[in-house]
């Protein structure tokens, strides 16, 4: 990954806010078409919810447990990145899900730890202002690929017409538990939802994994509760284990590693219904998986369609 270490004072390129699958897809398509692109992501690593936690106890895919490719375009995209094929068309990364994007990320200009505070439109183009006081300018187009509520906050002042549509999107949170047990569980490596558990996956059961641990990632349904973002992970993780044991009728062994993570905007249960929103005159596009559904493939489709719109100049003004 090439870090942009100073403001782009006279750029006439494209800024992409968010380096999840939507932003990475759009950037890949645009760069291959010869466009100058700079990405901004508030996280320490790229990939968004296709994420892997690396610990002293090994890796945990605490984001998307797998990728399902139903379209030939998404299958070809994942294959080009070296994704490992699993059962029923699923795709995996090794040693973790986030590894899928390593070949792509290494070729892009990504500003990590760059939380965008706001956008401004000047005569020479768009200015991207960060919370740390730095500004990057001037871009002829900005693509906002953050989750819907965050995207809404960024565009409200500069494109209020887009807000009405974004407000129709409803996103749900998901708590995730990362656990390694002392002894093996008498369970298959992939569990579909039961009770308050959305799904659970044994890390060693994924293809191309050199892993002998009894390490699991447990995703809870939104109705698991604990909506307060200030709830301590150390309190939540044992509650998830208790719910997991109850759901599958198990007396769980001792955990040698235990943590939890809350995805505040995990998926859209009420998506927008089209791949992106756009203002042609202002050069501002907004998209993400939340525009079409809840799967990573929807984020890919949104990013691809936004990139195509930029290249074709056929963005429909709203």
Image (tube, rainbow, N blue to C red):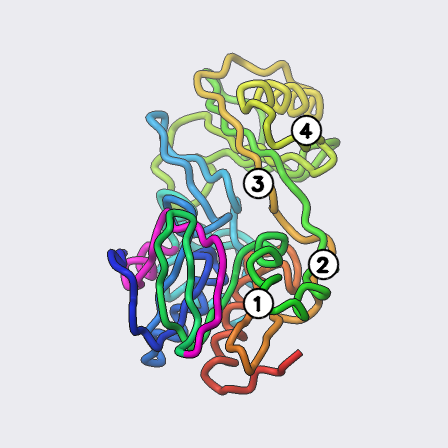
Looking at the picture, tell me which residue is in the foreground, 7 or 209.
Answer: 7
Residue carrying label 3 = 263
Residue carrying label 4 = 226
Looking at the picture, tell me which residue is in the foreground, 187 or 215.
Answer: 215
Is 107 part of what is drawn in magenta?
yes
Is tag 2's residue or tag 3's residue first in the polypeptide sequence?
2
Packing grade of label 1 (10 A; few <14, some 14-19, many >=20) is: some
Q: Is residue 234 left or right of residue 270?
A: left
Q: In this view, does 240 lie to the left or right of 90?
A: right
Q: Are marks 2 and 1 in contact (CB under 8 Å)?
A: no
Q: Quadrant of the C terminus?
A: bottom right
Judged from the image, the secondary structure of the residue bearing numbered disc 4 is loop
Magenta range: 101-123
| x and y, in percent, of residue 124 in the image | 39, 78
Residue carrying label 1 = 158
Q: In 3D space, how far apart are the residues under numbered discs 2 and 3 (Cα atoms)? A: 19 Å
Judged from the image, the secondary structure of the residue bearing numbered disc 2 is loop
| x and y, in percent, of residue 4 in the image | 27, 59
């Amino acid at each position: 990954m090439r870090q942009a270490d100073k403001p782009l004072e006279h750029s006439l390129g494209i800024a992409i806010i968010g380096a999840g699958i939507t932003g990475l897809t759009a950037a890949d398509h645009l760069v291959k078409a010869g466009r100058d692109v700079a990405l901004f992501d508030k996280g320490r690593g790229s990939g968004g919810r296709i994420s892997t936690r690396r610990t002293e106890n090994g890796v945990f895919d605490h984001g998307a447990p797998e990728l399902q490719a139903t379209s030939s375009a998404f299958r070809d995209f994942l294959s080009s990145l070296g994704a490992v094929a699993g059962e029923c068309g699923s795709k995996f990364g090794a040693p973790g899900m986030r590894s899928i994007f390593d070949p792509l990320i290494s070729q892009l200009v990504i500003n990590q730890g760059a939380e965008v505070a706001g956008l401004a439109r000047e005569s020479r183009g768009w200015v991207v202002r960060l919370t740390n006081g730095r500004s990057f300018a001037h871009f002829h187009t900005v693509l906002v690929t953050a989750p819907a509520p965050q995207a809404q906050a960024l565009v409200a002042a500069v494109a209020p017409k887009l807000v009405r549509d974004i407000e129709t999107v409803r996103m749900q949170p998901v708590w995730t538990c990362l656990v390694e047990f002392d002894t093996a569980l008498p369970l298959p490596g992939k569990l579909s939802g039961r009770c308050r558990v959305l799904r659970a996956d044994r890390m060693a059961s994924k293809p191309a994994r050199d892993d002998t641990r009894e390490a699991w990632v447990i995703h809870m349904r939104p109705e698991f509760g604990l909506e307060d973002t200030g709830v301590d992970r150390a309190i939540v993780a044992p509650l998830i284990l208790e719910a997991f044991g109850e759901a599958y009728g198990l007396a769980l062994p001792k955990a040698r590693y235990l943590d939890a993570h809350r995805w505040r905007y995990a998926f859209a249960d009420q998506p927008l219904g089209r791949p992106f929103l756009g203002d042609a005159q202002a050069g501002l596009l907004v998209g993400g998986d939340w525009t079409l559904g809840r799967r990573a493939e929807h984020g890919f489709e949104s990013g691809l369609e936004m990139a195509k719109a930029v290249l074709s100049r056929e963005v429909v003004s709203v």
